[in-house]
């Protein structure tokens, strides 16, 4: 049972916006994680490696100091996680962005493409969750 | 060097934001997407706050001719809303809806060592690679 956490979520959002903003203001780079990840596979420039490294290191620190920030994965089979992972990896590349790239950076910069992409992946996500709950009984 | 350190710091801060905001809780992500069921709108607050903050900083940045550490700002992407975009977003949405994980949180959560998250992470890299190999 998850609870509504408007304050923590807003603070989290501010931190995300700040992180992305600093990367933009100082380095002129867009902090779309899928974009950085995808580009790093063909051009592993220092700033990309550093950003991704920061995410990994941040995860290590969170896990050690504030483990309650890391939630347990859902009731999903390994097969479901593999398919979902490939879909996220491939889809974000094909669509040119993810929740950070399109949802935060793109929308903030007024990109119609990003609005369309965000509405799409949210709508599909909502449909999938509905189907998993009603057809599959909540676990996959 | 400055640019690299800043990028690392940004990644760190980004991870903190994801953690504090709840994005590293797949259950919370799915609850946000469970709009017809037990809906938890918290993640809308994450996104709204992020957009408000980022848009403000971008506005400040736009008054400059160049980023603080040099280089140039990216061009505005005035691309079309085409089938690739919508298909890609749909496939991403499918994966996100199933696992409750998107790229950022997935990378951050790898630290837990949870086997299912690791499997997701490796699969995500595979998906990225498949695309990159295909489009060469």
Image (cartoon, coloured by chain):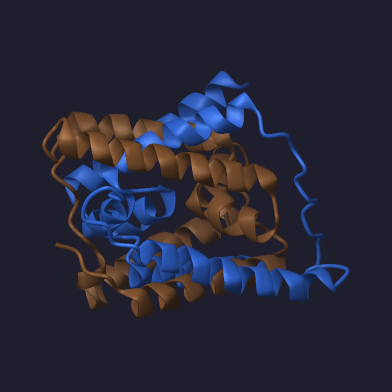
Chain colours: A brown, B blue
Residue A29, visible in the rendered structure: yes
Residue at 29%, 54% (x, y): give it.
B110
Q: Position of residue B114 (x, y in %)?
A: 18, 51
Q: Is residue A23 left or right of residue B132?
A: right
Residue A94, visible in the rendered structure: no
Residue at 27%, 57% (x, y): give it.
B39
Q: Which quadrant of the figure contains the C terminus of chain A?
A: top left
Based on the displayed image, in which of its 4 quarters is residue B31 positioned? bottom left
Based on the displayed image, in which of its 4 quarters is residue A17 positioned? bottom right
Based on the displayed image, in which of its 4 quarters is residue A122 positioned? top left
Q: Is residue A33 above or below residue B40?
A: above
Residue at 85%, 73% (x, y): give it.
B64
Tell me how many marks there are: 0
Q: Position of residue B100 (x, y in %)?
A: 30, 48
Q: Is residue B34 left or right of residue B7?
A: left
Quick one: A32 or A104, which is closer to the camera? Answer: A104
Q: Position of residue B45 (x, y in %)?
A: 43, 68
Q: Position of residue A116 (x, y in %)?
A: 59, 42
Q: Is residue A16 left or right of residue A4?
A: right
Q: Which quadrant of the figure contains the N terminus of chain A?
A: bottom left
Q: Is residue B83 above or below residue A10?
A: above
Which residue extends farthest front? B36
């Amino acid at each position: 049972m998850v609870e509504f956490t408007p304050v923590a979520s807003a603070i989290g959002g501010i931190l995300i916006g700040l992180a992305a903003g600093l990367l933009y203001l100082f380095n002129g780079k867009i902090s779309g994680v899928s974009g950085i990840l995808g580009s790093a596979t063909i051009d592993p420039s220092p700033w990309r490696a550093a950003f991704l490294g920061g995410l990994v290191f941040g995860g290590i620190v969170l896990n050690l100091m504030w483990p309650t920030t890391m939630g347990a994965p859902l009731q999903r089979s390994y097969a479901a996680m593999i398919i979902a992972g490939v879909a996220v990896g491939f889809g974000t590349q094909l669509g040119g962005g993810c929740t950070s790239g399109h949802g935060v950076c793109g929308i903030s910069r007024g990109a119609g493409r990003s609005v369309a992409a965000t509405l799409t992946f949210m709508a599909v996500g909502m449909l999938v969750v509905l189907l998993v709950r009603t057809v599959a009984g909540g676990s996959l | 060097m400055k640019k690299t350190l800043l990028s690392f710091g940004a990644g760190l801060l980004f991870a903190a934001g994801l953690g504090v905001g709840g994005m590293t809780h797949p259950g919370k992500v799915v609850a946000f997407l469970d709009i017809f069921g037990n809906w938890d709108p918290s993640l809308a607050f994450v996104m709204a706050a992020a957009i408000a903050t980022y848009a403000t900083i971008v506005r400040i940045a736009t008054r400059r001719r160049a980023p603080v550490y040099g280089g140039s700002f990216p061009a505005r992407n005035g691309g079309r809303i085409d089938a690739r975009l919508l298909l890609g977003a749909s496939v991403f949405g499918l994966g996100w809806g199933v696992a409750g994980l998107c790229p950022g949180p997935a990378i951050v959560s790898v630290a837990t060592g949870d086997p299912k998250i690791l499997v997701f992470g490796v699969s995500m890299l595979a998906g990225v690679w498949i695309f990159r190999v295909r489009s060469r």
